[in-house]
Amino acid sequence: MAYIFIGIVVFVVCFSIFKAIKKRRLPSNNYTPFDDIERGKADKD
């Protein structure tokens, strides 16, 4: 059972990397929830 779980995790990671390389860009890592806190945004906005 552990091998199946590890296999699924490895597959998802490899698939995500493949899609990022195929699009030739990586997702932006500049956003954090702290940015919304600083700007005073609420979930309703």
Image (spheres, grey):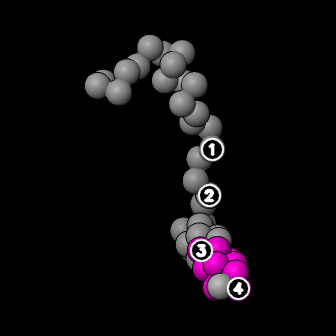
Is 20 or 9 nearer to us in this picture? 9
Disc with the residue nearer the chain's start (3 vs 4): 4
Please tell me whether residue 35 is drawn above or below residue 22 in the rendered image: above
Q: Which callout, 1 or 3, points to the residue nearer the camera?
A: 3
Cα separation between marks 3 and 4: 14 Å
Q: Position of residue 19 (x, y in %)?
A: 56, 72
Disc with the residue nearer the chain's start (1 vs 4): 4
Q: In which quadrant of the rendered view does residue 33 lie? A: top right
Q: Is residue 7 magenta?
A: yes
Q: Secondary structure at mark 2?
A: loop
Mark 4 in CB contact with mark 2 (< 8 angstroms)? no
Please tell me whether residue 13 is drawn above or below residue 25 in the rendered image: below
Q: What is the chief secondary structure element of the magenta stretch? A: helix
Q: Which mark is residue 29?
A: 1
Please tell me whether residue 42 is drawn above or below residue 12 in the rendered image: above
Q: Which mark is residue 9?
A: none
The magenta segment: 2-12
Q: Is residue 44 visible?
A: yes
Disc with the residue nearer the chain's start (2 vs 3): 3
Report the amino acid beneath label 4. Tyr
Mark 1 in CB contact with mark 2 (< 8 angstroms)? yes
Q: Which callout, 2 or 3, points to the residue nearer the camera?
A: 3
Q: Is residue 21 visible?
A: no
Disc with the residue nearer the chain's start (4 vs 2): 4
Cα separation between marks 1 and 3: 19 Å
Q: Residue at x 48, y 16 (%)?
A: 39
Q: Which residue is mark 3?
A: 12
Cα separation between marks 1 and 4: 31 Å
Q: Quadrant of the C terminus?
A: top left
Q: Which residue is mark 2?
A: 26
Report the amino acid beneath label 1. Asn
Q: Which callout, 1 or 4, points to the residue nearer the camera?
A: 4
